[in-house]
Structure formats: C-alpha cells, structure tokens
Amino acid sequence: KATVVEGDKFDDELATESLDESNAKSALEKLQEDRKTLPIYPYREELLKAINDHQVIIIVGETGSGKTTQIPQYLHEAGYTKHGKVGCTQPRRVAAMSVAARVSQEMGVKLGHEVGYSIRFEDCTSDKTVLKYMTDGMLLREFLGEPDLAGYSVVMVDEAHERTLSTDILFGLVKDIARFRPDLKLLISSATLDAEKFSDYFDSAPIFKIPGRRFPVEIHYTKAPEADYLDAAVVTVLQIHVTQPPGDILIFLTGQEEIETAEEIMRHRTRGLGTKIAELIICPIYANLPTELQAKIFEPTPEGARKVVLATNIAETSLTIDGIKYVIDPGFCKMKSYNPRTGMESLLVTPISKASAMQRAGRSGRTGPGKCFRLYTAYNYLHDLEDNTIPEIQRTNLANVVLTLKSLGIHDLINFDFMDPPPSEALLKALELLFALSALNKLGELTKVGRRMAEFPLDPMLSKMIVASDKCKCSDEIISIAAMLSVGNSIFYRPKDKQVHADNARMNFHTGNVGDHIALLKVYSSWKETNYSTQWCYENYIQVRSMKRARDVRDQLEGLLERVEIELSSNPNDLDAIKKSITSGFFPHSARLQKNGSYKTVKHSQTVHIHPSSGLSQVLPRWVIYHELVLTTKEYMRQVTELKPDWLVEIAPHYYQMKDVEDPGSKKMPRGQGRASSQQLGS
Ligand code: ADP
Ligand code: MG
C-alpha cells in the first residue's frame, strides 16, 4: 500500500526551451537563464534586502531551490565581495568541490580564481578568490590563523541541519565574532531546519523561507524486512528499469565500498542482456572518485537510456541531481558512534532517522511526481526509526575539537555556547586523552607539544605521532605513514577475478611481519623509488589515485613540519624507532592477545579482533597497537602493528603501569604459536 506525500503543483513549462534558441546561445547565456528558473530567483531582491537589514538570517528552502549556488553569487553581484570574501561551508568535501565547480561555470570563470574551494589537504583558491566554498572543518581551522575572520564579509553556514561537529562549533564561534564585527553578515541555511531553534540560538534572528516546488511522491515499503539490502537494492533497480516509465534512479548507500560492490553486481547482472533492455548508465559518487567521474552524475541522460546514481547521504540534501524520478532507500547510513566510557569510536552502519527518510524520498519529486522504494517495512519506519539524527557532537570523540578550541584560547569549555552541549563525560574524556598525549598540562593548559599538534589538520593521536617522531629522528618515515593512513583504506586494489594475485602482491610488503604501518611505509617508499610510476602501481595492485593523494598529503605535512620546527630526518632501517613514534601517539590503542585468538584492549578490556585485511591477521602477535576500530560482524582493529609491552610503560608512564603490561598468560601461551603460523604464511 502506497502513502502519498502532498506537494504543490508546479508548472514545468518554464523549464522547457526551444532547441533552436539554445543552440544559438552561448553556454554561458544558457546557464544565466537557467539561474532565473530556480525557485530562489523571485526572492532575490527580498533576500538581499533582508541581508542588508539584519546581521544574522536563518534561511530555509527546499533542496535544489538554489541556496548554495545562488546566494553567494547574489552577494557578489550586490557588492559584498568588495571588502571581503563570501565563505560558504559544506559538511562534505564532495559538495564543496562540486558546488564550487558549478558556480565557477555559471560565472564563466576558472575554478580556483574568483570562485574556489578549500577542503582538507586541498586548497583550490587564489588571491582573486571572492566566493569560497569549503568544508566546515576548514573554516574552523581558519579561525586558528584569523580569529576574527577579517578576510570575510559574509559567512554562510550551509546545510546547518546536518549538525556536524564542526558546524556546531562554528555556530558558537561565528555567533561570538558577530558581536564585535557588526560589518560581518551571517547566514545559516538549510533544507530542513528546526528554524525556530536556530533563530532562538542566534538571538532571535529572522527566518527567511524560500517556498519550494514539490511533486507528490509515492512511497512503497517492503512487506517483510530485507536480509540483504544491497541485493534488494540491485533487484529493485532492475525491476524499475524494466517496468517503469523513463526517469533516473537514485540509490542511497553507506559508503564507497558498498557503492563499488553494488556497481559491480549491477554491471554483472546487466551484462549480456544486450539490446533487450534500454541502456542503464551507472554513476557512482563518493569523495575519492576522480572529479571527471563525479561530474558525470550531472550530465543529462541520453534519450532512451536511464541513469542510476549510487550515492551516500551526500545526495540527501547537499547535491541536487536533476531528472531523478525514483529513489531507493535501504534505510541505512554510516555513522560515527562513541563510547565515552572507553573512549572508543566506531564507524557503524546505522538506521537513518525519519527526517532523513523524508529527505531521501523528496529527492524523487523535484521535477515531477516520483516514487520512493523503501527497503524496510512501514512498521520499521513508524516504530524503529528515530525522528531526528542525534547531532554529531553528542556521539563523537571530542579530542580534536577540544584541542582546536584550546588553541583558540577558549579554556572554559563547559560554558562554551553550544547549541546542544556534548555529554560532559565526553568532554572529560577528551581532556584526559589530550593530557595523556601531553598536549595539555595538569591545569588543562595547552603545552608546547599541544601547540605543535594543533598545527596539523589531523586527529590528535596522529599529530602526536608526528610530533614524537622528532625525538626518534624518523619524521620522514612518520609523515609518509600518516599520509597513507589519512587516505583511508583505498590503497590496495583487490579485483574479484584476481584476488589471489592481489593478495600475493600485498603480502610482499608484509615480509618479516613488519605490521601494517610499516607495510604502508614500504608501499610509499617503493612507489617513490620508481619515481611515482603508474605502471608499478598496476603491477602491485595499488590504486594510483590513492597514492597520488597520499603524496599530496605528505607534501603538506612536510610543509607543516617546518612550521613547528621539526627537522625532516630519515631513519628507514630502525623500525623500532618508527614503531615507538607510532606508539607515542597511539598508546591508548593497545591490545593483548587472548588464548582464543581474540584480543583485549589493555586499558578497557574490550574484546577486539585483527581485521582480516591486516598483514598480521594470521600472525597474531601478543601485543599490538591499532589505528582504528571498525565494527562489522565483530569489533575489528584496522592497521595493526606489533608492540613491545615495555614501550607502553616507557612512553606513557602516566597512562600504563607495569601491572597493565605484565603477562599472566605467558605460561599458558607458548611464544612460538604465533610465529609458526607466520612462517606458514611466508612460505
Ligand atoms: P540548494 O542549495 O538550495 O539545495 P543548489 O544551489 O545546490 O540548491 O542547486 C540549484 C540547482 O543548481 C540544482 O537544481 C541543479 O540543477 C543545479 N546544480 C547544482 N550543482 C550542480 C552541478 N554540480 N552540476 C550541474 N548542476 C548543478
Ligand atoms: Mg545546498
């Protein structure tokens, strides 16, 4: 049984244009005309007047109405960029890049000149830049260099409803500077917003609503819960493709891996169908996808074909793709969760909220009536989904933010003007961790180490690892490792039909069971020795793209070393020195082997396992240190290196005592056991 969401009718005559005319016009003129068809356009003058009259405005308008692409241009046209930049923040990297690219096209300028973007490790702006799109995290970092944001005349905190950690902190900071910078304009914008709450927070700022266009959306639920939503999603795509009238499909998945898997299954199942069915154009979109391919999702679908876009939450409100008529919503997203008791953070696939489900469904009814296929039951929707997503600040590790705030001279964190305060337990945990890392002293003040750490746009444990490498004289190796860890888990390539070859190639870097960190270092150094050869990457089943990104990140980290006066020193043969530096940052992430082959974290006695992708997953060293935990079927440690337990006491005597690292199980667990299996693996 279908539920129908009511919506206003909209005359779509407006959007059609005679072909002859558009051929005669330049692309730029065409884009200028398209701008005038957006729902926000009729409100241009009214909006500019409101901005002129008020310092802070809350703007609410349906996704696709033109908030992100148009408002900064209106401000530019109205002269706001004469004495400062217009900055517009986005919670996601892809959105910042993609929107900046679009706006530069509309303005007929080169991306990076008048219109640019800035995301972590990638600054595509210049002295000319007046419209700057950036991630919320980047604006937060800009406060470190420019605490009054003097270079900006307008700051637009966009997608405010996402309530990312950085956005929430920005709220407090921009609200504060607005008080002593009456010339600064602040816009808080979003598609769905509890506008009253935001208005209250910003001292009763006026709310500007842009009426949207919406067509009715038919919502279909599954009769019974789906055991495998990925498979169900693919089946649904094919069903829509063969039974439904033209119109593109949008599927919401949880991340890159899942998107790639879905793409593969879909290509496999449509192969050989030949001309029996219409062409299905599969367009994935995620952060690590090359920009040319990202742009593909916006290309108009050729006559007779159908496009299917595989996206994460990004397509919920941040990106608008025209022509979507069908939405498939499996009902999940990847979300950070944090246990303040143990200080452990995991990325979890979690059910979405009702608010998210409504947004997703709405994406199908933008240009005509749409259909949304929810791969869960109506009962699930009503009874199991939360109304709203919990703001990130209430479910994350706050160490990074606390370090940033401390560097900004904000000491009284308890009384910081949070829209929704974080749990005090989480604040306390963050302070404890920073103290353990020697970033803060006993009084909670920033130390020299802490000040150096804050210079790096990395998590505090990674920053600490880098700062500590100074003493171990291996900063060169450590920044390579940090860069490789920062690009995530997309270094090794494992095609389905060549898994054995790929695994063998990967194990080459693990010779001697050096651990995953050193293996990453070896990959990087070997690539560098081949003078960054693409061929070498192919031969070793390594993703060139990820490597290039790691090189960029590494270059920037090298630049930052100089800023904090750490010499670039290389010590490639002293693996213990390198591992000790890693331990200096990651000692809270230590674990000890149990009799049954699982591990227990030293500090909190949580049961964890080595991730099967780790080079040590068959070796099972007695003591390990891990980079992160991921929870799938089990709680897995990803990126693992063997550790000498004495190091823990030597490096972090304030954190570990001898009794923590003494080994009661040593008699029952002969040392040889792990080694034997490692030799089997090597042969
Ligand atoms: P909002 O921020 O209100 O959701 P946007 O300003 O992002 O709306 O989008 C307005 C319109 O601009 C969209 O309907 C879409 O047609 C177009 N658009 C936005 N980004 C792109 C892009 N990267 N490529 C092509 N068209 C785009
Ligand atoms: Mg937008």
Image: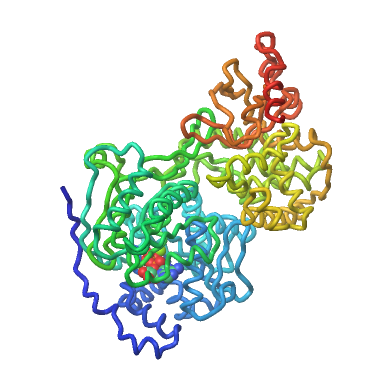
Q: How is the image coloured?
A: rainbow
Q: Is residue 530 visible?
A: yes
Residue occupying the far top of the picture: 667
Q: Position of residue 580 (x, y in %)?
A: 75, 33
Observer-nearest residue: 45 or 246? 246
Q: Nearer the viewer, residue 289 or 416?
A: 289
| Percent position of residue 172, x then y | 48, 52
Q: Residue at x 21, y 75 (%)?
A: 11
Q: Is residue 639 above or below residue 391?
A: above
Q: Is 512 located above or below residue 38 in the figure?
A: above
Instruction: Please give left or right for residue 401 compared with residue 194 in the image.
Output: right
**For residue 522, side relative to residue 321 (left or right):** right
Q: Whole-percent x and y of residue 667? A: 69, 8
The residue closer to the viewer here, 227 or 648, is: 227
Where is ligand 1, by quadrant? bottom left
Q: Is residue 207 visible?
A: no
* Number of marks drawn: 0
Viewer-proximal residue, 34 or 153? 34
Say which residue appears at 24% left-offset and 67% top-offset. 368
Find residue 389 and report its horizontal and vertical position in percent.
Answer: 37, 45
Query: Is the C terminus in the top left, top right, bottom left or bottom right quadrant?
Result: top right
